[in-house]
Image (spheres, helix red, strand yellow):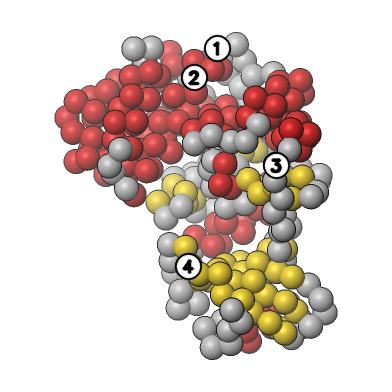
Amino acid sequence: MTVAGPAPTARLESLLGTTISAVTDLGRSHAWTLLRVRTADGRDLFVKAAIGHHDSDGVLDAEAAGLRWLGRATPDGLVPAVSAADSGLLVLPWLTETAPTAAAAERFGRELAALHTTSPEYFGAGWPGWIATVPQDNRIETGAWGDWYARRRLAPLLPIAAPRLGPGGVRTVERVLAEIDRLAGPAEPPSHIHGDLWSGNVLWTECGARLIDPAAHGGHRETDLAMLALFGAPHLDRILAAYREVAPPAAGWQERVPLHQLYPLLVHVVLYGGSYVGRTVAAAAAALGE
């Protein structure tokens, strides 16, 4: 369907330096309108526009910053370049999806490993963070990842999730916080990570996998690997095998998957509750080795 009224056409034309010849409304996601745009100079673009055209919380600003930050760390095209961005607007190249293949999965594994081998030398990021519509504490720190993860990721969400988790669930997560030094694994330098790398944020194209919708920051590379497994990624075994060829994770990384999944599961408890409560408590118990 081609639309004219709801689209921020004038702002897009100013940002892109060309006229808009067609706009297709793709529907809504959370607080954003999604559009496919064709420009007079022949470009096909994806536009994410805050409803009301004003992103008061800066969610799209954070998404644009994260894409640019990740893109500077990996020159291979794994992260699409931001075509334009403004308050309440994010414009990316239009990516035509294809079916994921085993070969594409292996290439993705190698490219993700290469991204993770680059380090920002800190945990956090230089902009206010978000994961979906949940604020994320991105204050930059150095030191041990486990301590940072406990204080900047798990602890801020626990009071919000507590009414749904119940006293027993809260106590289990609190034990993870108390024992984080034992659970966190060997020390590693911070990596450039996507931060919300579930399978829906990996688009498969003819040119390979492309990463979208990041909650990017300096973090632990095992977080991205655990996120790929959380809801299942196509050819995950091929992705991980190729990844290990380039940058093998530290011994015991499989046992730490529940620890890294605990944060996104807490996010889902905050947003949705329901079945995620049981999964979150189970992940906390598994992280503790129970």
Disc 1 + disc 4, Cβ < 8 Å: no
The location of residue 158, given as percent across then percent down, is: 29, 37
Q: Secondary structure at mark 3?
A: loop
- The crowd level at tag 1 (other Cα within 10 Å; few <14, some 14-19, many 20+) is few
Q: Amino acid at mark 4?
A: Arg
Disc 1 + disc 2, Cβ < 8 Å: yes
Q: Earlier in the sequence, mark 1 or mark 3?
A: 3
Q: Earlier in the sequence, mark 4 or mark 2?
A: 4
Q: Earlier in the sequence, mark 3 or mark 2?
A: 3
Q: Which residue is mark 4?
A: 28
Q: Which residue is mark 2?
A: 256
Q: Which residue is mark 3?
A: 100
Q: Which residue is mark 1?
A: 252
The location of residue 3, given as percent across then percent down, is: 58, 84
Left-right relation of 96 to 49: right
Front disc: 1 or 3: 3
- What's the CA distance linking mark 4 and mark 2? 36 Å
Front disc: 3 or 4: 3
Look at the picture and state if 125 lies above or below 57.
Answer: above
- The crowd level at tag 2 (other Cα within 10 Å; few <14, some 14-19, many 20+) is many
Q: Earlier in the sequence, mark 3 or mark 4?
A: 4
Q: Nearer the viewer, residue 202 or 196?
A: 202
Look at the picture and state if 197 lies above or below 29.
Answer: above
